[in-house]
Amino acid sequence: MTAPPRNVPSSIALHGVRWLRSSYSTGANNCVETARPRTGPGAGLLAVRDSKDPAGPALLFSPESWAGFTAGIGSDHF
């Protein structure tokens, strides 16, 4: 069994995804955007990219890993 990819060099490689950003984000583009690729590299994973560099790399996380990360932020674990 091969391991899922951990990143893609360019988020442009994730075709047909809808990038979302928090409603708390300002127009300064100082946040991250997330997407859920359904096909191709990252299918079934959560993609995260820097909103200032939309053509730049995207990190890929399992849904469980991302949920744990966001729960840790919400509980001030970090």
Image (cartoon, rainbow, N blue to C red):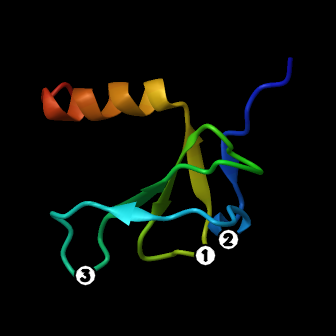
Q: In the image, which disc is placed on residue 55?
A: 1
**Label 2: few (<14), some (14–19) or many (≥20) C-alpha neighbours in 10 Å:** some
Mark 2 vs mark 1, CA separation in Å: 6 Å
Figure quadrant of residue 31: bottom left
The answer to whether residue 74 is above or below residue 48 is: above
* Residue drawn at the location 21% of the way across and 34% of the way down: 73
Secondary structure found at label 2: helix
* Residue drawn at the location 75% of the way across and 49% of the way down: 41
Q: Which image quarter holds the C terminus?
A: top left
The tag earlier along the polypeptide, 2 or 1, is 2
The answer to whether residue 16 is above or below residue 69 is: below
Q: What type is the residue that disc 1 sits on? A: Ala
The tag earlier along the polypeptide, 1 or 3, is 3
Label 2 sits on residue = 12
Q: What type is the residue that disc 3 sits on? A: Ala
* Residue drawn at the location 38% of the way across and 62% of the way down: 20
Mark 1 vs mark 3, CA separation in Å: 17 Å
Q: Residue furthest bottom?
A: 27
